[in-house]
Image (cartoon, helix red, strand yellow):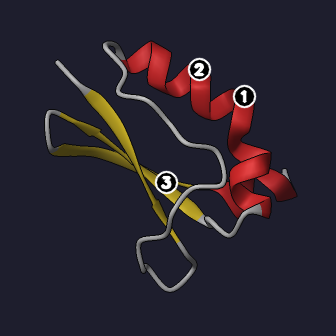
Amino acid sequence: MVWMWRFETADGAETAPAVEPEEFTTQGDAEGWIGEVWRELLDGGADRVILFEDGTEIYKMSLSAAAEA
């Protein structure tokens, strides 16, 4: 299995991430990585992220909502 993130701006357009991700072998590794770098991604222009497992969308998450919490 391959877990990957997609990065989007507030209007839903795909954007290049400020921190280049890798392909992750577990969901936990992918989520751990996003937990470490989400602020840098947000500062770099990504407003939300989408997690995929082998090309299937698992969930979307707003980075700006995390900053407000």
Q: Callout 2, which amino acid?
A: Gly
The spot of residue 57 in percent (x, y) is 23, 47
Is disc 1 in contact with disc 2, using a CB cutoff of under 8 Å?
yes
Q: Which sits earlier in the primary sequence, circle 3 or circle 1?
A: 1
The local secondary structure at tag 1 comes to helix
Whether residue 31 is situated above or below residue 45 in the rendered picture? above
Q: Is residue 67 left or right of residue 22?
A: right
Q: Callout 1, which amino acid?
A: Glu
Residue extending furthest toward the bottom: 11
Q: Which sits earlier in the primary sequence, circle 3 or circle 2?
A: 2
* Gap in angstroms between the C-alphas marked 3 and 1: 14 Å
Which residue is rendered at x = 22% and y = 24% of the image?
Answer: 2
Q: Considering depth in this image, is 56 or 45 the residue closer to the camera? A: 45
The spot of residue 26 in percent (x, y) is 34, 13
Find disc 1 in the rendering and name its residue.
Answer: 36
The spot of residue 12 in percent (x, y) is 43, 79
Residue extending furthest toward the right: 68
Q: Which mark is residue 3?
A: none
Find disc 3 in the rendering and name its residue.
Answer: 49
Is disc 3 in contact with disc 2, using a CB cutoff of under 8 Å?
no
Which residue is rendered at x = 14% and y = 33% of the image?
Answer: 54
Find disc 2 in the rendering and name its residue.
Answer: 32
The spot of residue 64 in percent (x, y) is 72, 63
* Gap in angstroms between the C-alphas marked 3 and 2: 14 Å
Q: Callout 3, which amino acid?
A: Val
* Gap in angstroms between the C-alphas marked 1 and 2: 6 Å
Which residue is rendered at x = 49% and y = 54% of the image?
Answer: 49
